[in-house]
Amino acid sequence: MTETTDLLSQMNDRTREVFRRVVEGYLQSGEPVGSRTLTRSMTERVSAATIRNVMQDLELLGLLDSPHVSAGRVPTQLGLRMFVDGLLEVGPLTDEDRAKIDATLGRNDAEVSMFDRVGTALSGLTQGASLVLAPKHEAPIRHIEFVSLGQDRALTVLVFADGNVENRVFTPPPGQTPSSMREAANFLNAIAGGRTLAELRGVIDQEIAARRRELDVLASALVESGVAVWQGEGGQTERLIVRGRSNLLGGTNAEDLERIRELFDDLERKRDIADFLELAEEGDGVRIFIGSENKLFSLSGSSLVVSPYMNADRRIVGAVGVIGPTRLNYGRIVPIVDYTAQLVGKLLSNRQ
C-alpha cells in the first residue's frame, strides 16, 4: 500500500469529504478554499470551526497548505497525488471532445502532418501545452540526395521505401561542388538499398574506410556531415512536437508568471523531454506525473498527463501528453489523452 492510499484509508468520511472538496475547489478555481465555502457544500451540516479543525489536521499530515494569511487551503503535491490515486473521478470522453479529435485525425495524409495536428488538437482541447513523441522511422531507405542551398547550407533528402520523405538542413564541408555532392549521394545509394537508417549508420564508417580511394575527400566529408544530421542528438529532438505554449499564459496571475517562465525553459529542452517521454513508452495506459515526481519539471511545479501508443505489432512506439500547472482538470484531460493515444495507434496500424 502506498503512502497516499494508506493515509486515505485512515480518514473518516468527514475528513475525506473536506479534503476532496478542497482539492476539487482548487482545481476548478485556482484559489484557496475556505471553511465558510465548504459549509455550503458539505453533505452533513457542520460548522466552519469544525471544518477549520479538519483542515488543520490535513495540513499537519502534509496534504493541505496555507499559501496566505487567510484561512483558505490548497492541496500540496502529496495531497494532489493522493487525490489522483484515490479520489479522482475520471469521466467519460464527451461526444464534443471525441468529435473534435476524430475530425482532426480523420484525414489521410503524411505522418508528420498527422502528429503536428495531434499536438495542436490536444493543446486546443485542454488549454495546456501538448507533447507528441513521434515514432522512429525504421523503413528501408530507397534513395538519398544532397541539395545545395548556398555556400554554408545544404539539404539531405531521405526517401523511404514506404513513401515517406524526410528533409534535414545541415552545414556542408567548405568547398563542396555539384560533382562532390553527386559522388556522395551515389556512394550512399550504393550501400543504402534495403537498409534502414539504423542499419546504415553501422556500415558508413566501415565503407568509407574501405573505399576511401574511390570516394573524393570532399565527398566523404559530405557523407559524414550529411548523415550525421540523423546520428547526432538532434535526431531525438526531431521526434518531439510541442504545441500550445501560449495556452499556459491564459489567466495567469503575477505570482505564477515566474513558474510559467521556468516551464517554458523546460519545454525548450526538447531533448530532455524526449528522453523522459521514452520512459512513458515502457508502461501502458495513462500516467500522471505531479510536480517534483518529474525531475524535469520540478522547478516549475508542473504536471504531465501522458499515454503511450502502439503500432500494428502491439509495440509501443511513441507517446502523447499534456503539460500544464498542477491545477489541471485531470478528470477531463485523462480520457482525452487516453483516447487520442488509442486513435493514433489505430491510424498507424491501418497504414502498416
Image (tube, rainbow, N blue to C red):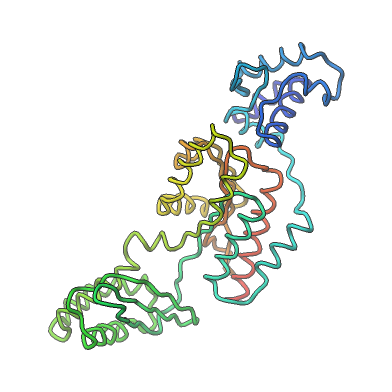
Q: Nearer the viewer, residue 59 or 123?
A: 123
- Above or below 341: residue 210: below
Q: Nearer the viewer, residue 262 or 339?
A: 262
- Above or below 283: residue 99: below
Which corner quadrant of the image does residue 309 belong to?
bottom right
Q: How many marks?
A: 0
Q: Position of residue 238 (x, y in %)?
A: 42, 63
Q: Position of residue 293 (x, y in %)?
A: 51, 37
Instruction: Tell me: 128 left or right of 232.
Output: right
Toward the left, the furthest residue is 213
Toward the front, the furthest residue is 254
Which corner quadrant of the image does residue 289 belong to?
top right
**Residue plotted at (74% across, 19% down):** 35
Quadrant for the N terminus, please. top right
- Above or below 265: residue 69: above
Which corner quadrant of the image does residue 327 belong to?
top right
Q: Position of residue 110 (x, y in %)?
A: 55, 75
Q: Position of residue 105 (x, y in %)?
A: 65, 68
Instruction: Tell me: 303 left or right of 296.
Output: right
**Residue plotted at (48% across, 36% down):** 258
Instruction: Tell me: 323 left or right of 46.
Output: left
Quadrant for the C terminus, please. bottom right
**Residue plotted at (40% across, 54% down):** 271
**Residue plotted at (17% across, 84% down):** 215
- Above or below 342: residue 190: below
